[in-house]
Amino acid sequence: MYLIVGLGNPEKDYGSTRHNMGFNVINKLANQYKIEVTKSKFKGLYGTGMIEGEKVILLKPQTFMNLSGESIKEIIQFYKIEMEQLIVIYDDMDIEPGIIKVRKAGGPGTHNGMKSVVQELNTQDFKRVRVGIGRPQDKENLVEYVIGAISAEDKEKLDKGTDLAKEAVIEVIKKGIDIAMNQFNG
């Protein structure tokens, strides 16, 4: 069973922000595979279903980004998920909008949500899909950039990235991380 986690902030207020790329990918997977992500437990919203013949749990932590690891740790412990079966999806300022990167493992970088995940799980050895959001051109406040409004032009690029990320997750499940990395890391 795969645990697929999108990082973000509660959608009522932050649904259309750069920091919610992980949630957006989960929503696209849920829509395509008819999985309802509505159960409230483990400090998150989750749903179970099938993707390409594999049982999956889709999770959107509701702890706010900086405490995402708490939700992930709780659901992993409850369902006894192995690290090899975890995929975390999140936004990355070091990647241009519309581009994604698939990795087997690695550090959290400057991403506070990933810092929480690595700290709570006490490992960096899990799959991740990083969705590019780019950096602000005029060095505006970074917080405002990641949780502020998105222009229509930027939204189009970000949607392309979340579509690619959705496809990358499906490829990881179907053919494995190495093939997904070769296909999507161009």
Image (cartoon, grey):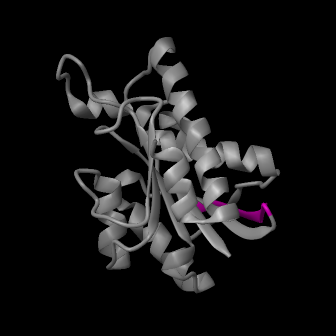
| Coordinates of residue 96 in the picture (x, y in percent) | 36, 31
Secondary structure mainly formed by the magenta segment: strand
Tally of numbered tags: 0
Residue for point 60% across, 66% down: 176
Q: Which residues are magenta?
A: 43-52
Can residue 167 be seen in the rendering of this structure? Answer: yes
Picture coordinates of residue 30 (x, y %)?
Answer: 73, 50
User: On the rendered structure, is 141 left or right of 2?
Assistant: left
Q: Residue drawn at (41%, 61%), measured in percent from left and top? A: 68
For the question of whether residue 60 can be seen, the reply is no
Residue 82 is situated, as x and y percent measured from the top left of the image, at 54, 82
Q: Is residue 38 above or below residue 69?
A: above
Single out the residue that lies furthest toward the left.
139
Please say whether residue 47 is one of the residues in the magenta stretch: yes
Instruction: Check residue 116 for magenta coloring.
Output: no
Residue at 38% x, 77% y: name it.
121
Q: Is residue 48 left or right of residue 139?
A: right
Q: In the image, is residue 64 above or below residue 81? A: above
